[in-house]
């Protein structure tokens, strides 16, 4: 956006429903595609991460994701590290009436974070050899990151609605990512961001991954409360351009992870074609039988004491981790076998790995979901 003749000029921005992936001139058998994804020295079998939501990720689900070659992120500032019996606290949220749910989440998020619980949860995740990733906001990172790493955390995620390398505050000395990375000696993933310049500056700090997305999730209300956000396709394209520019300048490749707003395999494929190396899903994992809230979900900022920016929803418990990620499935809406959808899409555009998938063509196609679908719409 810029000023033209004294007026603000609006630039177009695109979300998942505004674009489509054009088929390629070469096709590949899906079983020949490689969907591995890496953060620092850690490599995962598929490019789908479980988001750090109390409703989606507890130590049990993180271990189950690890068994399947994936990664789930646990929220250090959520219920897991405030309550000895986190499952009871989660069930209290689930049992609350809808109009009271935000107040219940605020009350349950009010107790202090217990340092001993951080160590306990990290050790629980790593019991069966799973890679442990945990998340907290920038305000608590300097305090909580060393505790988590001492307990065995493998990847640390610094996450807030908007995170930048430059931040003004009353703090005498704020969070400096270069110092954090040097001190804790594990890969640091940072988010969230949506633009070229802030992403490029974060990459200069030495981070190991960047999360893309402000307010797109089904449980997030930041866009309604604050009016801030950029549709995910445009945001991913801009952040991926910063990654590529940084790679050309330094030779260091840093993965981009599109975080939120994806409802099905098609949205995940579009995010990857837009330049993402992986995606982070929250509500999708809340639907799994293995998830702690058994079919409910709520946002990380729902418990904010002064300005909650999330809502509790009930997507239902209608799948399992295996069906969600790998199938088989009889559902026709793309909400299961997400990894299979990615591999099939790669086959149709002739991409043998995620890097080649970035080269597939995206077109502006706002009618892509409705063209010729009159009978589907009538159901």
Image (cartoon, rainbow, N blue to C red):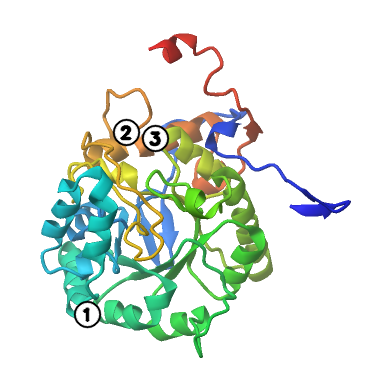
Q: Judge whether 36 appears above or below 324 on screen.
A: below
Residue at mark 1 to residue at mark 2: CA–CA distance:
37 Å
Residue drawn at 26 percent across, 29 percent down: 328
Tell me the SS state at disc 2.
Answer: loop
| Residue 118 horizontal side relative to residue 135, left or right | left
Q: Judge whether 379 appears above or below 193 on screen.
A: above
Residue 29 lies in quadrant: top left
Sequence-first tag of 3 and 2: 3
Residue at mark 3 to residue at mark 2: CA–CA distance:
18 Å
Q: Give the residue furthest to the right.
A: 5
From the viewer's perspective, is the residue at label 3 or at label 1 nearer?
A: 1
Residue drawn at 38 percent across, 65 percent down: 306
- Give the number of marks: 3
Residue drawn at 43 percent across, 74 percent down: 138
Viewer-closest of 64 and 233: 233
Residue named by callout 1:
115
From the viewer's perspective, is the residue at label 3 or at label 2 nearer?
A: 2
Q: Residues within 10 Å of mark 3 (few under 14, many from 20)?
A: few
Residue 336: mark in rendering: 2
Residue drawn at 41 percent across, 33 percent down: 341
Q: Quadrant of the C terminus?
A: top left
Viewer-closest of 168 and 135: 168
Q: Residues within 10 Å of mark 1 (few under 14, many from 20)?
A: some
């Amino acid at each position: 956006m810029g000023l033209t003749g004294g007026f603000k000029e609006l630039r177009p921005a695109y979300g998942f429903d505004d674009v489509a992936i054009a088929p390629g001139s070469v096709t590949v058998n899906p079983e020949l595609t490689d969907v591995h994804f890496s953060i620092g020295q850690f490599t995962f079998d598929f490019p789908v991460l479980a988001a750090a939501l109390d409703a989606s990720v507890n130590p049990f689900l993180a271990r189950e994701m690890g068994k399947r070659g994936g990664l789930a992120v646990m929220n250090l500032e959520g219920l897991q590290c405030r309550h000895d019996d986190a499952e009871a606290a989660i069930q209290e949220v689930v049992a609350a009436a809808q109009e009271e749910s935000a107040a219940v989440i605020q009350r349950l998020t009010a107790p202090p974070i217990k340092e001993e619980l951080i160590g306990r949860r990290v050790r629980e995740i790593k019991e069966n050899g799973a890679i442990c990733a945990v998340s907290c906001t920038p305000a608590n990172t300097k305090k909580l990151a060393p505790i988590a790493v001492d307990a065995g955390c493998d990847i640390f995620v610094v996450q807030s609605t908007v995170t930048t390398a430059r931040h003004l505050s009353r703090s005498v000395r704020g969070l400096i990512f270069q110092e954090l990375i040097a001190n804790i000696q594990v890969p640091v993933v940072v988010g969230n961001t949506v633009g070229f310049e802030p992403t490029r500056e974060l990459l200069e700090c030495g981070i190991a991954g960047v999360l893309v997305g402000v307010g797109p999730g089904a449980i997030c209300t930041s866009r309604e409360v604050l009016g801030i956000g950029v549709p995910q396709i445009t945001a991913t394209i801009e952040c991926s351009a910063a990654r590529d520019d940084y790679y050309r300048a330094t030779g260091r490749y840093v993965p981009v992870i599109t975080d939120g707003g994806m409802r099905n395999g098609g949205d995940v494929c579009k995010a990857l074609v837009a330049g993402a190396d992986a995606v982070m899903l929250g509500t999708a994992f809340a639907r799994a039988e293995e998830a702690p809230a058994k079919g409910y979900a709520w946002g990380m900022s729902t418990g904010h004491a002064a300005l909650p920016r999330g809502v509790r929803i009930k997507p239902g418990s209608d799948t399992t981790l295996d069906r969600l990620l790998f199938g088989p499935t009889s559902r026709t809406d793309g909400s299961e076998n997400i990894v299979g959808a990615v591999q099939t899409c790669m086959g149709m555009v002739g991409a043998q790995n995620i890097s080649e998938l970035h080269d597939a063509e995206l077109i502006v196609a706002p009618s892509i979901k409705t063209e010729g679908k009159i009978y589907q719409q009538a159901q």
